[in-house]
Each structure stands twice: as C-alpha cells, then as structure tokens.
Image (spheres, rainbow, N blue to C red):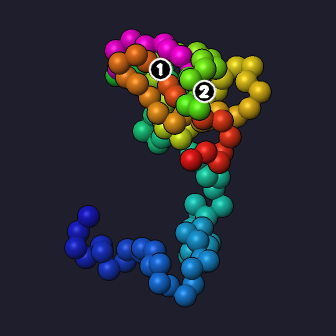
Amino acid sequence: MKQSDLGRMLSRDDDDDDSNVTVRDIAHAAKLATATKRESMGICFVGKRKFPQFINEYLPDPMPGRFICVDTGEVVGRHNGSALLTIGQGAKIGGASQKWFVANKDSRTGDVFVCGGTHHP
C-alpha cells in the first residue's frame, strides 16, 4: 500500500454520529458489486478444500482426544484432533443434548474443554 492510498481508506470511528451505517451500507451507496454478495465465514486462501483437509497438510498427524465439560470434568465426547478446533467455535459432539463450545485446549493431552450454552462465564 502506498501513502497516497491512505487518503481513500475508510475506517470506523466510534465517535461517529452515523454509527448505524455498516460496511454493506457503504458498499450499496458506492454501487459496489460486493454489496449484495453473500457473506463468507470461510478462509479465503483455503479454497474449495474443507478446513480439516487443508490444515492436515501442514500439521503432524492429528491427536484425537476427549471433549471435557469445564464445569463437571465429565467426558462428553471425542474429537479427531484439537488442532482442527478453535476457542469459541461450536464443538460438534454427536448425540449431545445441548450445544457445546470450545473453551480451552490442552495440547499435551489432546483434551478439548467445552462449555454448554452460549452464556458461559
């Protein structure tokens, strides 16, 4: 990026009176083609591959482990590798009666600590 490009850069100012204006609103006003594109939560450089397939190309063999409830210490499921999970991500635990989220990871044991629900301290 050149110094001359900075003058055209937009950034959010928390003191701005127009705080309800979103990036998408700005894109609509500027008639940008991306204004109506669907949002992507993927990682752009991964391409068409699934994330586990991508990350396993760069990491040693994944260490399967346990999903452990942070509140009770109970094993609530098993996973195929903690490197495939990020803190805050929903943990896909088959047969679970509630939604679980990754709260912490222990890279030595491969254990992934999870909490139930979306309102956990």
Residues 13 and 33: in front is 13
Q: Residues within 10 Å of mark 1 (few under 14, many from 20)?
A: many
* Residue 81, position as x, y percentages in the image: 47, 18
Mark identifier at residue 72: 2
Q: Residue 96 carries which label?
A: none
Q: Is residue 78 visible?
A: yes
Find out whether the residues at labels 1 and 2 contact each other: C-beta distance under 8 Å. Answer: no
Rendered image quadrant of residue 46: top left
Asked whether 107 falls inside the magenta stretch, the response is no
Q: What residue type is labelled 1?
A: Asp
Callout 2: SS: loop
Q: Nearer the viewer, residue 56 or 81?
A: 81
Q: Position of 96 compared to 56: left or right? A: right
- Above/below status of 16 relative to 57: below
Distance Cα–Cα, label 1 vs label 2:
14 Å
Answer with the quarter of the image where residue 94 lies.
top right
Task: Give the residue type that dot 2 points to.
Answer: Thr
Q: Nearer the viewer, residue 47 or 107?
A: 107
Position of residue 102 measured from the top left corner of the image (x, y, whole percent) = 54, 34
Q: Which residue is drawn at 60% across and 67% down?
A: 24
In this rendered view, identify the residue nearer to me: 24 or 106.
106
Determine which residue is flagged by label 1: 111
Q: Residue at x 60, y 27 (%)?
A: 72
Give the residue furthest to the bottom.
17
Relative side of 37 to 2, left or right: right
Magenta segment? 59-67
Q: Is the N terminus in the top left, top right, bottom left or bottom right quadrant?
A: bottom left
Q: Check disc 1 and report its element: helix, strand or loop.
A: loop
The quadrant in which residue 70 appears is top right
| Image depth: mark 1 or mark 2 in front | 2
What residue lies at 56% left-to-right and 23% top-to-bottom? 73
Give whichever of discs 1 and 2 has the lower sequence position.
2
